[in-house]
Image (tube, rainbow, N blue to C red):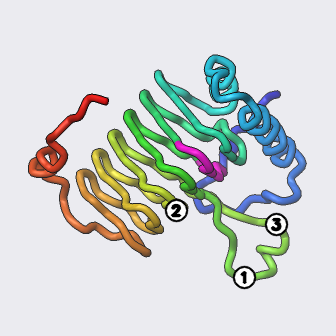
Amino acid sequence: MQHRKMNVEPGALYDANYDTELIAERTAAKELCFELNNLRPSMVAERDEIVRRLLGQVGKNCCIESPFHCDYGYNIMAGDNFYMNVGCIILDGARVTFGDNVFVAPHCGFYTAGHPLDHERRNAGLEYALPITIGNNVWIGAQVCVLPGVTIGDDSVIGAGSVVTKDIPAGVLAAGNPCRVIREISEADKLRYSKIVKL
């Protein structure tokens, strides 16, 4: 299938509900998600093949656990050593970029799409999308919600249950609703879990 690869100016309204081409592209992505979500966990090569067909870019050592859902797939860019745990959703009306060594915990959502506040344009099926960018070495805790237009800087950690409404700088621990910076991640954090046990 030839992808349209939505080329809409960030924040501009477009017809997400009644545009037949976009509906077809979302259906194609849902079919691939269905295939992925119904494969046995042991079918590693087959799972990887579907992920590489679904996403726009996939680095080395990419693992997306099932179930996983997205809108288009081709707007999702994943770097090397990307891990996304179960139950995650990406609404990729705009580009969603994950850097290298990103760890996403269960049941997180990355939502580029938004809708007009006035009901007339919203009822007409119009929406907008703003890109989301996740830097390198980022850990996203369980049930985090990342909203349109957000950038999370390199080496940061987002605490479980956070709603990320604004950009988060690099090298910090941030959490809450709305998500806010709690403190910088320091050299002392390397010593916090210094004991390694062999099982």
The answer to which of 133 and 29 lies nearer the viewer is 29
Q: Is residue 146 visible?
A: no
Q: Residues within 10 Å of mark 3 (few under 14, many from 20)?
A: some
Callout 2, which amino acid?
Cys
Q: Residues within 10 Å of mark 2 (few under 14, many from 20)?
A: many
Residue 96: x, y in percent? 54, 46
Dominant SS in magenta: loop
Callout 3, which amino acid?
Gly
Q: Residues within 10 Å of mark 1 (few under 14, many from 20)?
A: few
Mark 3 and mark 2: Cα distance apart in space = 23 Å
Mark earlier in primary sequence (3, 2): 3
Point out the residue furthest to the front here: 199
Q: Identify the mark at residue 118; answer none if there is no mark.
A: 1
Residue 124: x, y in percent? 84, 71
Marks 1 and 3: in contact by CB < 8 Å?
no
Mark earlier in primary sequence (2, 1): 1
Q: Is residue 176 above or below residue 34?
A: below
Mark 3 and mark 1: Cα distance apart in space = 12 Å
* Residue at which label 2 appears: 145
Identify which residue is drawn at 28% across, 46% down.
155
Callout 1, which amino acid?
Asp
Magenta stretch, residue numbers: 85-94
* Residue at which label 3 appears: 125
* Mark closer to the observer (2, 1): 2
Q: Is residue 69 visible?
A: yes
Q: Is residue 17 above or below residue 90?
A: below
**Left or right placement of residue 32 versus residue 12 in this view:** right
Q: Identify the mark at residue 135; answer none if there is no mark.
A: none
